[in-house]
Amino acid sequence: MTQNTIKLQKGEHRDKAVVFLQFPRDESLIKIIRGNYDARWSATQKMWYVSASQFELHEFMQLMKGKVWVDYGGMKEKSHTEKPKDIEQQKPEKKEAKEVPAHISEKLMQFRKWMKHRRYSESTINTYADAVKQFLVFFMDRDIRTLNNDDMIEYTHEHIVKNKLSFSYQNQLVNGVKLFFREIEKSKIELDKLQRPRREHKLPNVLSKEEVKAILSAPKNQKHSAMLSLIYACGLRRSELLNLKPADIDSNRKLLIIRNAKGRKDRIVPISEKLIEMLRDYYTKFKPEVWLFEGQNAGEQYSEESLAKVLKTACRLAKINKPVTLHWLRHSYATHLLEGGTDLRYIQELLGHKSSRTTEIYTHVSTKSIQQIKSPFDDL
């Protein structure tokens, strides 16, 4: 491999499909790659990698045009990280997705750059860009400028409804398409008339205090126990936990500082002496270098996939058969606060909700008042 070559290789990392980027260390290339992708360094593979779901070969080729030679032969081969299988055991490969035309890739690249310029979060950028890509590829034989509101209705019916995609995905699609056609592409789509799906009114899933205690007590690993306990004790989102650093714990004031959370907002939440002692014991044993919770390699952020597995294992050990997710712990924290008499306005601040309407949903799952209602059946 020459000095001016990037070698691409499909593979898996932490049970997730990725594309590895192999090249001699070059700060200018690293800056370009990290500026356009949520790229991470693999200490085990000694290579940068990006999620396969956000990687488009043509888009990458355009990005690197005139800067470096791209060897993409590995995009057609099995990764060296995959375990070999007998031919008889191999499952038939899925049909490859439609190749994204050059003009769509260029527009999507512009869209990503615009969102980065406006400081959208990496998660939002990937969500909106992917939703818009699916929409444009569906009409790939059409001039983008001719697309209109009727095409959105057709796409919703033929793709979203037929594939039973969620209300939230449809809402994200509308957000992405509105942003794309307003800022990047002028078309016949009337943005003000672009309708969102009718709002779902689902109640948050809440665990009892007994169930939460069983889950938090289940892990044998001290790090796992500390992570799950911190999510529930402070009502954290998954990303908020993983982005914590040791300095974010103010033990003197008994506060946890959550930086750059959803909506790019900082907030503080109280942290009990009981939890501080638990984190002190964890810190003494594991000695994290950068992040409060790190993976197997020092300085490497703990992965979302591994955290989800920690919860799944804890639920299995606690013999809880519900489809519990990490967000259930956050919902349970808010509901238990409300049932304990905490004012809804304070709960809104603790959760980092922009609108009080978001927090009010917990009044519908709190059982404090409902359980006091006597059914007329009991008087029969």
Image: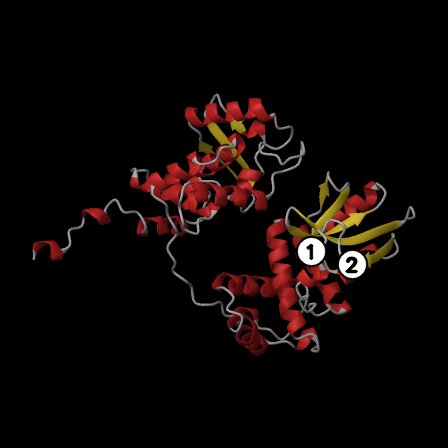
The spot of residue 377 in percent (x, y) is 12, 57
176 vs 214, left or right, is right
369 vs 337, left or right, is left
274 vs 124, left or right, is left
| Label 1 packing within 10 angstroms: few (<14), some (14-19), many (20+) | some
Rendered image coloring scheme: secondary structure
The answer to whether residue 197 of the structure is visible from this angle is yes
| Residue located beneath label 1 in the image | 52
**Quarter of the image that includes the C terminus:** bottom left
The spot of residue 339 in percent (x, y) is 30, 41
Could you tell me which residue is drawn at 56 percent across and 72 percent down?
Answer: 159
Disc number lying in front (2 or 1): 2
Q: Quadrant of residue 304?
A: top right
**Disc 2 and disc 1: Cα gap in Å?**
14 Å
Helix, strand or loop at mark 2: loop
Q: Nearer the viewer, residue 286 or 29?
A: 286
Q: Label 1 sits on what residue type?
A: Ala
Q: Quadrant of residue 316?
A: top left
Q: Nearer the viewer, residue 175 or 368?
A: 368
Q: Nearer the viewer, residue 260 or 362?
A: 362
Could you tell me which residue is drawn at 68 percent across and 65 percent down?
Answer: 93
The answer to whether residue 120 of the structure is visible from this angle is no
The spot of residue 258 in percent (x, y) is 52, 36
Helix, strand or loop at mark 1: helix
| Residue located beneath label 2 in the image | 77
Residue 327 lies, with reference to residue 181, above or below; the image says above
**Disc on the earlier residue, 2 or 1:** 1
Could you tell me which residue is drawn at 57 percent across and 74 percent down?
Answer: 155
Q: Quadrant of residue 264?
A: top right
Q: Label 2 sits on what residue type?
A: Glu
What is the residue that sits farthest to the left in this orientation? 380
